[in-house]
Image (cartoon, rainbow, N blue to C red):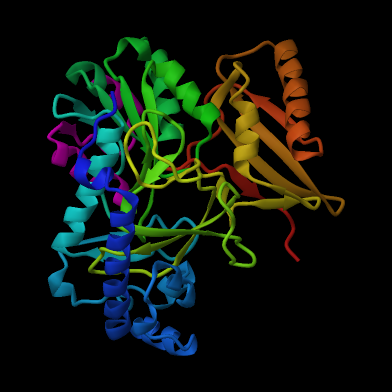
Amino acid sequence: MDYIFNKKMETLNRKKLKDLQLERLQQTVHRVYETVPFYTKAFKQFDVTPADIKALDDIKKLPFTTKDDLRKNAPFGMMTISLENCIELHASSGTTGVPVTVCYTHNDMEVWSEVMARCLSMSGLTKKDIFQNPIPYGTFTGAFGFHYGAQRIGALVIPSGQGQSERQIKLMDYYGTTFLSGVASYAMRLGQVAVEIGLDPKKLHVRNGLFGAEMFTSGLKKRIMDNWDMDVHDIYGLTEMCGPGVSTDCDQHDGLHLWEDHFLVECVDPITLEPVGVEEEGEIVLTTISKEGMPLLRYRTRDIAMFYDQGMCSCGRTHVRHSMIKGRSDDMVIIRGTNIYPGQIESVLMNNSLVGGNWRMVLNTENDIDMLTVEVETKERLSSTDTEQLSIKLKGDIQSVIVFTPRVDVLPPNTIRETGLKAKRVIDNRKKD
């Protein structure tokens, strides 16, 4: 059943939604121009003033904001108000560089818990649920976003935190957890651990899950659904916006609804930065239009997706829908002149019933030629003959997607070492010029 947390705003007609966006955009533009030196300077360079923003399409007159801009002005140079008016600080995981710091006002926290409550409700969470949150509590936004949203709905929250997988399973069994959050690859890992300690995931009480923090394919989504006998939803977000809570898929599982009353979205070619057409892949660009502490204009997320032709979703929500995240423009690797996203490899692997949930791409240089090795774990230990046959099968299947033939190393379960909250899918050991 598809629950709607805030029916008035989630089903607002498109004209009223656009009018609200313009009003909030204009307020945001004025605020950053007057209070953030970075934007004051950028506006002058682009020869634009807040008065020039008369329609939503005028957003194209404004400068883009990048993660490098945030790092150069870290930790508090992008703030619009003083720290004494903020009540919470979070930071990105810093996996690709210096962590990005974001401070929240009381109203920012209200908005964050609201959009998270919408996402969780859309995924089936109600006040009757027992909600387990196996995400690290700390400056990383993930755990707190889910926690605040679940509390806003009124669910009973188990703040189980990161790791200790066997303990996580025992908590689920003991307390009767009905709803699980976290990262898709870790949900797969928990399912494996349950089997290892003699518990069938399907016989636990977990019937819904909402997973984010990393890209995951429809194949992995289906694998989790089958392993746990649960409905699985995908959540998208990033620290620079609020954390998780930017968008989620409804029960139609036909795209993620993005909350347009809080985020103005564009989709552009990551090279030319020109808008792409409807249902054409591009980079998601987001502008916060209700944020007080650290509003951002035209933030380049580097996340690649496509947006669907706007039409009333059968769930009743009017907010625009986008595809699952294909990957990040900066995660794309070029091997022998071919552009490859990790998601392309994962789509192939997850369609094979012998394959487990853990895998990675390892890139090396041999005789000045780039080589790709795909390391993949099996669900169960296989004989040497079955291992060889699986390797041959996967080589062919992957070659049909990426043009050239990779090496495929088929490994026993639990061989690839865990690297933290997010699975590290690409290991690039190639010689650098």
Image coordinates for residue 366, horizontal then vertical, percent: 82, 48
Quick check: 230 above or below 253?
above
Q: Can residue 6 be seen here?
A: no
Q: Is residue 365 left or right of residue 293?
A: right
Mostly what secondary structure, the magenta segment? Answer: helix
**Is residue 88 covered in magenta?**
no
Image coordinates for residue 346, horizontal then vertical, percent: 60, 33
Q: Can residue 151 be seen here?
A: yes
Quick check: 390 above or below 419?
above
Examine the image and state in which quarter residue 143 appears: top left
Q: Nearer the viewer, residue 371 or 183?
A: 183
Residue in the image at 63% along x and 27% along y: 349
Q: Is residue 244 left or right of residue 148?
A: right
Examine the image and state in which quarter residue 81 appears: bottom left
Image coordinates for residue 371, horizontal then vertical, percent: 78, 44
Tell me how many marks there are.
0
Q: Nearer the viewer, residue 415 or 405?
A: 405
**Is residue 146 covered in magenta?**
yes
Q: Which span of residues is magenta-colored?
A: 141-170
Q: Nearer the viewer, residue 235 or 67?
A: 235
Quadrant including the N terminus: top left
Image coordinates for residue 356, horizontal then vertical, percent: 55, 23
